[in-house]
Amino acid sequence: MAQSVFDEHGIIAKLPTTLARKLFFHNNSEILKSICLFKYLKQTGIMMYIFDLLKPAQFSDGCYIFRENTVPNDIFFVVGGKADVVQR
């Protein structure tokens, strides 16, 4: 069966704020629990804004996300698997 494509952000933007927030927390509760940053955010609007900026990524074994003495361009939250931190 073909997967339908829809504008999730556009649909949610049309919902009343209370309903949009309930839907957001219902759909993303497991991810929010796994990223400790969200535990400290009390304002749901800020939480929803930051969450919307997150993009899933997957890396192969042995892949470097960034190297020591370089300035990373992104922030990474490991929500599955493992990552080694190596300092030389």
Image (cartoon, helix red, strand yellow):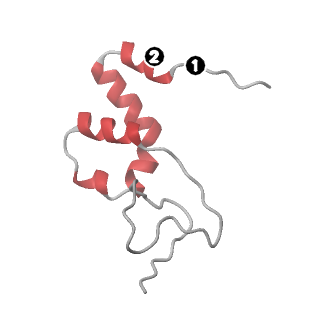
Residue 57 location in percent, x, y?
55, 51
Residue 54 location, quadrant? top left
Sequence-earlier tag: 1 or 2? 1
Residue 45 location in percent, x, y?
25, 33
Q: Amino acid at mark 1?
A: Phe
Residue located at (51% from left, 71% from top): 83
User: Which residue extends farthest left?
Assistant: 42
Residue 12 location, quadrant? top left
> What numbered label is drawn on residue 6?
1
Residue located at (50% from left, 77% from top): 84
Residue 77 location, quadrant? bottom left
State the count of labels. 2
Give the spatial CA distance, label 1 vs label 2. Answer: 8 Å
User: Position of 34 compared to 38: left or right?
Assistant: right
Residue 8 location in percent, x, y?
49, 23
**Quadrant of the image containing the N terminus:** top right
> What numbered label is drawn on residue 21?
none
Contact check, label 1 and label 2, Cβ < 8 Å = yes
**Quadrant of the image containing the C terminus:** bottom left
Using the image, determine if residue 15 lies above or below residue 53. Answer: above
> What numbered label is drawn on residue 11?
2
